Amino acid sequence: MNRRRGRWSSVVLYAVLTVFGLLFLIPFVWILSTSLKGNEQIFTIPPEWIPSRFRWENYAEVFRRMPVLLYLKNSVIVTVLQMIGIVGSSSLVAYAFAILRWPGRNMLFGVLLATMMLPMQVTMIPVFVLFKQFGWLDTFKPLVVPAFLGGGAFNIFLLRQFFLGIPREIADAARIDGCSEFRIYWNIMIPLAKPALATVAIMTFMFSWNDFLGPLIYLSEKEKSTLALGLSMFVGQQTNEWALLMASSLLMLIPMIAIFFFFQKYIIQGFTMTGIKG
C-alpha cells in the first residue's frame, strides 16, 4: 500500500512539474512563432501559434539590417575574458580564505561579504571617473580588467564554501611532501572543485552575455557594441517590425538556452556540493 501511494505521489508530482514546465515554455514558443510571421499575422485574433507560412527570410533581414556577426564577436571576446578572469581570480582568493591561515582572515572575509550589500549604483560614478582617468573609455578594458581583480564577492564566497568542504588533511599531506601552495591549489584543489568552478563559469557567462548597462556606459563606438547593446539599438530603430524584433531576440536567447540546457547539472551539482561551513 505504501509503495503504491508513493508511486502515485511521484506521478502527480511529475505531472504538476510537466504542466509548469509547459507554461514556462509558452513565452519562448510565442517568440519563435512571431519571428516566423509577417506583420499582418502577428495581431490576428484568435492568435495563430503556427504561422500559415514560415518566413525564414526574417532572420536574413536581421543580418542585413544589423551587423550581428560583429556584435557576436565582441560579445564572445568580452564574455570569454570575463569567464577566465573571474574563475581564475575568484578561485585564488577563495583558496586563500579557505585553506591558508593568516591574521585577520575572518575579519577581511566579513568585509568582503559586506560589499555584497552595496548596490552597483553607489559605485558606478566613481568607477566611471576612475576608468576615464585611466583613458579606458570606449575600450573593452573596463568590462574585462575588473574580472581579473578578485572575481566578485559572491563567487569568492561560493568557492570558499566548496574548498572548506574538502578535508584539510589533503593540503597538509601535500605540504609535508614538499608541495608549494600554488601547486596544492592548481594540482589538488582545482581538480576537486570542478563542479563549483563550472557553476561560477556558467553564471558568469549568463551575466556577461546579457550585460547591457556595462557596454552602454563604457562603449560609444557602434563597432565595439556587444550583442545586448546592439540589439537595444536595433529595437529602437525597428519599433514597428515586430517579427524582426522577435527574430533578433531569439538570436540573443539561443546561446543562453543552449548553455543552460547542456550544463544545468553542473549548476545544481555546484550548489548542492557547496556546504555552508566556517
Image: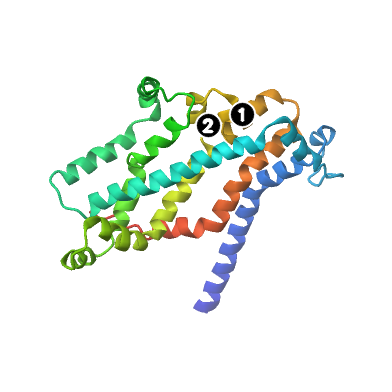
Q: Residue at x 42, y 47 (%)?
A: 84
Figure disc tally: 2
170, 9: nearer the viewer: 170
Left or right of 23 on screen, residue 182: left
Badge 2 amino acid: Phe
Q: Residue at x 59, y 68 (%)?
A: 11
Q: Disc 2 vs disc 1: Cβ atoms closer than 8 Å?
A: yes
Identify the residue under disc 1. Answer: 232
Give the secondary structure at mark 2: loop
Disc 2 versus disc 1: distance between alpha carbons?
8 Å
8, 174: nearer the viewer: 174
Badge 1 amino acid: Ser
Q: Earlier in the sequence, mark 2 or mark 1?
A: 2
149, 52: nearer the viewer: 149
Which quadrant of the structure image shows residue 251?
Answer: top right
Residue 270 position, x and y percent, is: 41, 57
Rendered-image quadrant of the C terminus: bottom left
Q: Is residue 144 visible?
A: yes
Identify the residue under disc 2. Answer: 212
Residue 121 position, x and y percent, is: 40, 25
Q: Residue at x 35, y 57 (%)?
A: 274
Q: Which mark is residue 146?
A: none
